[in-house]
Image: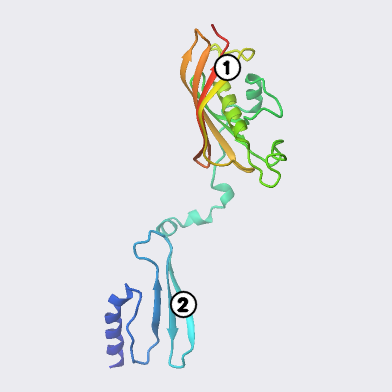
Amino acid sequence: MATSAFANSLLSSSSSLAHGVLPSTNNNFLLPSRVSVSNPRSQNPLLSAHFKLKDKTNSSSLITFCSLGAAAANDPKEEQIPIELKYPAYPTVMDINQIREILPHRFPFLLVDRVIEYNPGVSAVAIKNVTINDNFFPGHFPERPIMPGVLMVEALAQVGGLVMLQPEVGGSRENFFFAGIDKVRFRKPVIAGDTLVMRMTLTKLQKRFGIAKMEGKAYVGGEVVCEGEFLMATGGG
C-alpha cells in the first residue's frame, strides 16, 4: 500500500512540478516541500533545480540537480583545452620592420604593430596592441587610462598610408598627407590591454588631383569602437 501511495503521489505531482509547487502529502516519505525551477523557456545550457527536503523530524537538507549543456556533453574535450591554447594568434602578413620600410612614422607616433590582411591599393587590416606602457596613458587619464580618440583616427590613417604608399597606386612617402576626416564616430572607449583591429578600404581615387577617399573602421573584440571617412593627399597630379 505504501508503495502504491508513493507512486500515486509522484504522478499527481508531475503536473504541479512544472509550476514550481508540489502538493502536500501525509505519507511518511521524504518529499520536497518547495521546488525552485529555472524558467523552462530559458536557453541557458546549465539548468538547475533546488529541492528543500523535510523529514519527520523537521531536519532539512539542500540537494542540487544539474544537467550539463549540450556542447559540453557532446564534446568533453572542449572543457579540457587550456584557455591559452584555444585562441590562435593573428596572422602576420607584414611585420613591424616591413611597416617601417613603408611608413615614415617612428616612436612615439608609429601606431601600427602588424598587418594581418593586405591588398595593395585596395585595403588593409592591421592591429595596434594597446598597452599601459603607451606614452599617452600617463596624461589620458592618470586614474582611467583611455586611448585618445584622435590617436585612433591617426592609427587608421597610418593603415590607409600602408594601402596607398604602393607603386600600383603611385603613392610616395615624401608626398603623402592626411587631408581630412568626415563622419567620425567613437563608439566605445579603448583601454590598456585591448587589441585595436583596424580596416581601411579605398573607396575613391582621383589620380589627376592626387586625392584618395577611404573608409575606416576600428574594432575591439569584434565591436566597432571608431569609424569614419578619410581624405588622403597622395601628391600626384
Write down the residue under mark 1.
165
Pick the quarter of the image with the N terminus.
bottom left
Q: Is residue 89 above or below residue 16?
A: above
Instruction: Tell me if residue 217 can be seen.
Output: no
Q: Which secondary structure, mark 1?
A: loop
Tell me whether circle 1 and circle 2 mark residues in contact (CB < 8 Å): no
Quarter-wise, where is residue 92 in the image? top right
Residue at 43%, 83% in the rendered image: 53
Q: From the viewer's side, name the closer residue of 118 and 147.
A: 147
Q: Which secondary structure, mark 2?
A: strand
Percent position of residue 11, x then y: 27, 80
Percent position of residue 96, x then y: 65, 28
Percent position of residue 58, x then y: 46, 90
Quick one: label 2, few (<14), some, or many (20+) residues within 10 Å?
few
Write down the residue under mark 2.
63
Amino acid on which disc 2 is placed: Ile
Amino acid on which disc 1 is placed: Leu
